[in-house]
Image (spheres, grey):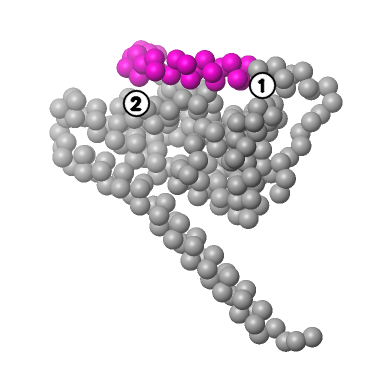
Amino acid sequence: MSVPQVERPGRVLPRVVATLLLAIAVITALIYRDRLDVEAMTDWVQQAGAVGPLIFIGLYAAATVLFLPGSILTLAGGALFGPVWGTLYSLSGATLGAAVAFLIARYLAGGWVQARAKGLIAGLVEGIEAEGWRFVAFSRLMPLFPFNLLNYALGLTRIPFLHYLLATLVFMVPGAVAYTYLGFAGREAVAGGEGLIQKGLIALALLAAVVFLPRLVARVRNRRAGSSRSSTESSASVRPPT
């Protein structure tokens, strides 16, 4: 499977401009990432009232596109909105940001992405060719590659956008649930809410599940791969001579 070619006459200049703007935005965000003030953001979202969730989703999406850490925002989502709505909003922001990064790489800034993900592209192309959306699902469950860079790099493969989007949305759920609940439990601990021990144990159980689930999936994949090889070899061994 080769990297899709999306060169179109008359669109070179917009693509170059988009690449430059993206590079400037990412570099600026990385330079000032230490100044990311979660408390100030939390106050801002709370003061926004009914549109606070939309602002949070937008900030999360922007952070994903600009290579800023999403785990901090997921924890903040749990503290702000609770375990249920916090998971929904964090997952929406992360999926939206992942979709935007994918589309930027596919249609606007593929050269810039390819220059920064040289060692990653070949493995992704091979994985997508062999497993399709299942490779995306596995990469979301087991963070073998940096999440933000992976979103861009997958845009350079030929996986259909809808397959990428659905696999990303569904298989980010376990991590989103765990980190959101951890943020919620932390807020309850600071506020001195009831049932702190129970909530703490639930948070630890969810984190343990997030750590164990990728290993379970990896074992299942390895067993299936082994059984497929065995069946192929057995079929070859009983094939009549010609």
Residue 189, given in percent of the width and then of the height, sits at 19, 30
Q: Residue at x 29, y 35 (%)?
A: 182
**Residue 201 relative to residue 233: left or right:** left
The amino acid at mark 2 is Ala
Residue of label 2:
76
Q: Residue at x 42, y 51 (%)?
A: 214
Is residue 241 shown above or below 136?
below
Q: Which label sits on residue 19?
A: 1
**Residue 46 relative to residue 1: left or right:** left
Res 27 quadrant in image = top right
| Lower position in the chain sequence, tag 2 or tag 1 | 1
The amino acid at mark 1 is Thr
Element type at marker 1?
Answer: helix
Disc 2 crowd rating (10 Å Cα; few below 14, some 14-19, many 20+) is: many
In front of the other: label 2 or label 1? Answer: 1
Most extreme residue toward the right is 9
Q: Residue at x 69, y 29 (%)?
A: 111
User: Do we see residue 18 in this rendering?
Assistant: yes
The reply to whether dot 2 and dot 1 touch (C-beta < 8 Å) is no
